[in-house]
Structure formats: structure tokens, C-alpha cells
Amino acid sequence: MARNTGIPLKYTRARLKHWAKLAGIDPAGSTFIFGPPGTTKSHLAAALAIHRLPHLIRGDWPQFRFSFAWRLVPGLLVEVRSTYRPDAPRTESDVIRSCVAPELLVLDDLCAEKTSTASLATIGLIVSQREEAERQTIATSNLTLEELDALDPRLASRLGTFRLIGPDLLGSEDRRLAPDEPEPP
């Protein structure tokens, strides 16, 4: 079911059952997953999203679609900046609406790019509008809430209302550097 949903191919086999440490955690609701690089944050975000996919189907076969989007934040911000060209086919508002509309949005690698006031304002606007529309968001970042707070207290405050999953559940070792280790903890 995860194929053709926008979830990166390498994560389409991610499942919550791989995370024994998360047993009993309700997968619904907004979630902020943070920790050092390589600690399976994106893999867990995919597992949470895949778990929810059956509840995100809209329409009838064969025209059904998922009310879901996966956005790599650095790429999203490049897309936003591309709207500033005079010949751009989309506006900044179009891009933001495409992030606010889905019932579930994954914002992967928040603040992985060189952050600016404008990039933080864009992400803050998306998170705020999604919160107002009561839409679920899963965000991943290498930064803790405290580190985000130093960059943008409003964004950190909003993300602080999400369920928080950090190194205490994920671990802190970079699994990319140990390829023989299984992906989830």
C-alpha cells in the first residue's frame, strides 16, 4: 500500500511492529521525531504514516487517492523559492496550500538546510495552518526542541505540543555507519 503514496521508496517497507520500544504508543496525532543523524527518524515517520494510510483513502477505486504528503523540507523550501521567479507556474501560496491540505503531512529533515528567517517563517506558517485545520503532522529533525527554540520560539512552541519521540526511544548511534545493523531499533 505504501508504493505510489509519496513515501520515499527506501521506507515503503517500514512498519510500526519493528519498534518494540514504541509498543502501546497511539500512532494517531501529530508527532515530532528528533535526534542525531542516522537514528531512523525518517524510517519511523514512514512507519507511522504507513500505519495511517488506510484511514487516509479518499474516493473510490480506481480513482482513489491518499490525503497524504511527504515533503523533504530542504526540497520544499527550494520549491517555495522557485515561486519568486516572474515566470513561475505556481505561487508561494500554492505550495503552502499543498502542504496544508492533506490530512497527514510528513515534514522530513526540518532545519537540515541553512535556516533563515524566511525558511523558518514558511515552515511555521505551514505548521500553524495545519494546527488550525486540525490536520496531523509528523516532523523529523536533527535538532532538539531547545535548539529549535533558539532559532524560532514560535515554531518550537508549536512542535512542543506534538507527541515527542527522541533519542531515549530511538537511540543515538548513526545506523547508516553500521550497515549490518537493522534499520529500526
Image: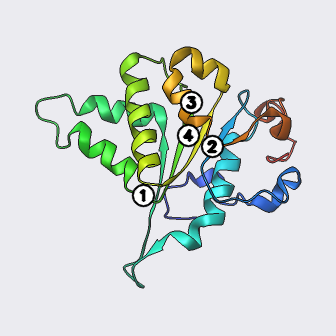
Query: Nearer the observer, disc 3 or disc 1?
Result: 3
Quick check: 126 left or right of 56? Answer: left
Q: Which residue is mark 4?
A: 108
The N terminus is located in which quarter?
bottom right
Query: Nearer the observer, disc 2 or disc 4?
Result: 2
Rendered position, 53 above or below 138:
below
Quick check: 1 left or right of 155? Answer: right
Name the secondary structure under disc 2.
Answer: loop
Q: Which residue is mark 3?
A: 157
Query: Which residue type does callout 1 highlight?
Result: Pro
Q: Which mark is residue 102?
A: 1
Name the secondary structure under disc 3.
Answer: helix
Rendered position, 101 above or below 162:
below
Tell me the residue at 50%/20% (across/down). Answer: 152
Query: Which residue type does callout 2 highlight?
Result: Phe
Q: Inspect this view and state whether residue 179 appears.
A: no
* Label 4 with label 3: CB-CB less than 8 Å: no
Tell me the residue at 60%/49% (across/down). Answer: 30
Marks 3 and 1, how far apart at CA = 22 Å
